[in-house]
Image: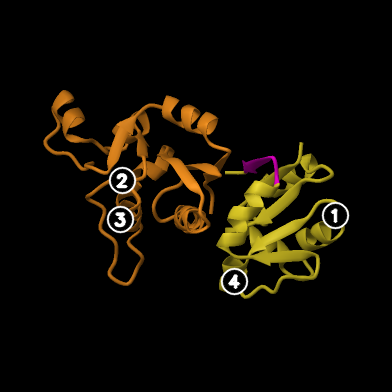
Chain colours: A orange, B yellow
């Protein structure tokens, strides 16, 4: 079956870790993930500048590795990202910012990508809250 | 249309669980994750409400969230792991997350 996942909560929220565990289990169960969409505060997961304490799970790194290893479509909402200071090189140049913090495998795009994923998948599973 | 509802917030600080129960119909399922498993705290009001639900509204809770909070699954709740979580979302026609 095909899954689309959407995340809403910041990196330190338990639901952002739960989403990763669900995604791992979905692939392990032989299912497909058509897209992972990062919305609202979850866009911080895609920032390459986040530093986690040494004795804590580095969830941004864990998500990055997971998306890279399985060649998933990891889409970050561009409007949510820009307002939270998560920019790729192109957007940093467009808005005259000194640096950027979003690189591959992440892609900045619009909310339409969430809608499209929801249409393409058999199930859309949203993760937010605590 | 049978819906699986996902809750993640504690019933003691948030009303999403109460709202969800008002919409929970025959055949719908409820999965407690994260702090929502505090609804299974023995002798609490949420526990009493959940234990009184009709049997055609199956209840589930994520096992690791129960274990992390030292809560045992009562007999009217099925504790599941992530593999079962994935399969559970396919048993229902749609999944609604209360964010």
The lab-note entry on whether marks 2 and 3 share a chain reads yes
Residue identifier under label 1: B53
Lower sequence index among marks 2 and 3 = 2
The lab-note entry on whether marks 4 and 1 share a chain reads yes
Q: In the rendered view, does A122 fall on the left or right side of A82?
A: right
Q: Residues within 10 Å of mark 1 (few under 14, many from 20)?
A: some
Can you tell which of label 2 and label 4 is closer to the viewer? Answer: 2
- In this view of the protein, can residue B83 be seen by the observer? yes
Residue identifier under label 2: A46
Q: Residues within 10 Å of mark 3 (few under 14, many from 20)?
A: few
Residue identifier under label 4: B69
Q: Which mark is residue B3?
A: none
Q: Which mark is residue A65?
A: 3
Q: Residues within 10 Å of mark 2 (few under 14, many from 20)?
A: many
The vertical placement of B23 against A11, above or below, is above
Residue at the (30%, 33%) spot, across then down = A108
Q: Chain of mark 2?
A: A
Query: Is the C-beta separation of discs 2 and 3 under 8 Å?
Result: no
Q: Quadrant of the N terminus of chain B?
A: top right
Residue at the (46%, 31%) spot, across then down = A114
In the image, residue B85 lies in the stretch drawn in magenta? no
State the separation of the CA atoms marked 1 and 3. Answer: 42 Å
Say which element carries label 2.
helix
The lab-note entry on whether marks 2 and 4 share a chain reads no
Q: Chain of mark 1?
A: B
Residue A43's x, y, as percent?
36, 42
């Amino acid at each position: 079956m095909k899954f689309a996942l959407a995340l809403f909560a910041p990196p330190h929220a338990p639901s952002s870790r739960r989403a990763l565990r669900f995604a791992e289990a979905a692939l392990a169960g032989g299912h497909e993930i058509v897209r992972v969409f990062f919305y609202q505060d979850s866009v911080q997961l895609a920032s390459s500048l986040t530093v986690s304490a040494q004795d804590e799970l580095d969830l941004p790194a864990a998500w990055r590795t997971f998306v890279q290893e399985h060649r998933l479509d990891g889409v970050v909402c561009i409007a949510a990202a820009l307002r939270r200071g998560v920019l790729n090189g192109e957007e940093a140049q467009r808005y005259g910012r000194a640096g950027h913090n979003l690189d591959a495998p992440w892609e900045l795009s619009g909310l339409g990508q969430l809608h499209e994923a929801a249409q393409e998948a058999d199930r859309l599973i949203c993760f937010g809250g605590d | 249309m049978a819906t699986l509802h996902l809750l993640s917030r504690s019933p003691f600080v948030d009303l999403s669980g109460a709202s969800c129960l008002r919409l929970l119909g025959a055949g719908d399922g409820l999965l407690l994750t994260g702090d929502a498993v505090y609804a299974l705290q023995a002798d609490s009001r949420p526990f009493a409400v959940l234990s009184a639900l009709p049997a055609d509204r199956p209840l589930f809770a994520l096992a690791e969230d129960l274990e992390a909070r030292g809560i045992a699954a009562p007999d009217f709740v099925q504790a599941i792991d992530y593999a079962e979580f994935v399969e559970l979302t396919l048993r229902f026609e749609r999944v609604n997350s209360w964010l």
